[in-house]
Amino acid sequence: MLELHSVTAGYDRTAPAVRDASLTIVPGEAVGLLGPSGCGKSTLAKVAALLHPPRSGRVVIDGEEVRGWRHRAPRELRTAVGVVFQQPRLSADPRLSLYDLIAEPLRATGRRAEVVERLPELTAAVGLTDELLRRRPHEVSDGQLQRACLARALVLRPRWLVCDEMTAMLDASTTAALVAVVEAYRSESGAGLLAVGHDGTLLERWCDRTLRWDEVADRTKDPART
Ligand code: ADP
């Protein structure tokens, strides 16, 4: 299970962006998290993806409590969660070809030998041709780059996938294609999904259940509400 228990998180000395948020996802389940812009969804998604340490609360992945975030997280926990963000250009190294971008997590975890076996199936699944794979991020569209970012998130076969507004910048056909790739991966691997977004129609179509932000987090201290 992916469990978030009473997570409070924020930035520097400002008021917390997320207060007392709790959420549990069972293996194979797709959970949508719906909320307006600025409510704290991305911050919570980063906590769940082990990229942002909470101020308080607990994150438990498959029974193991997370005690370190970013590079301090143990490798087996870090690689258990794949993540895709809204803006692929902020998360893609501009110096790498799309091929090297997708292969990078395998190389960084000492699994270089798997690159030739894993990349052809994955790049075909996300719809990237050999010609596109040779290009660097500035030579492709946002949609093509997001296809590469999704492939990179799946390359280590994560048990959990966090998609933070993955399709918010994309047209309808690219959105449908990327959601189909996630769903094919989930049905074949049994991975669980947290899909964060503001588009209720998309999340309700995509996910087994969709939670509103006020069902997950405590908004009673939110100045916008009082
Ligand atoms: P959402 O994903 O729901 O749009 P975010 O989690 O991105 O919400 O943001 C929640 C709050 O945290 C906002 O008030 C935002 O301005 C603030 N915030 C987000 N990222 C940072 C950051 N890196 N530094 C400081 N404040 C941030």
Image (cartoon, rainbow, N blue to C red):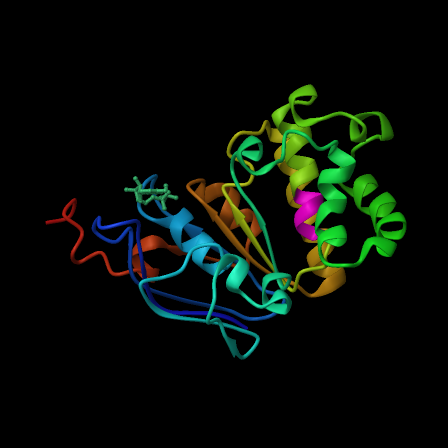
> Image point 48% across, 61% down: which residue?
69
Q: Residue lying farthest bottom?
A: 63
Q: Dividing the picture into quarters, in which one does residue 62 lie? A: bottom right
Vertical order, 86 against 29 (above or below): above
Vertical order, 33 against 151 (above or below): below
> Image point 18% across, 51% down: which residue?
222
Which quarter of the figure is the N terminus placed in?
Answer: bottom right
In percent of width and height, residue 152 lies at 69, 46
Task: Give the left or right position of residue 62, taking residue 52 as reference.
Answer: right
By secondary structure, the bulk of the magenta-drawn segment is best described as: helix
Between 217 and 133, which is closer to the camera in this rendering? Answer: 133
In percent of width and height, residue 126 lies at 75, 39
Q: Which residues are magenta?
A: 150-154
> Image point 50% across, 49% down: which residue?
204
Task: Give the left or right position of residue 114, taking residue 162 as reference.
Answer: right
In percent of width and height, residue 217 lies at 30, 60
Q: Is residue 16 magenta?
A: no
> Image point 22% across, 56% down: which residue?
219
Vertical order, 36 against 24 (above or below): above
Vertical order, 134 against 124 (above or below): above
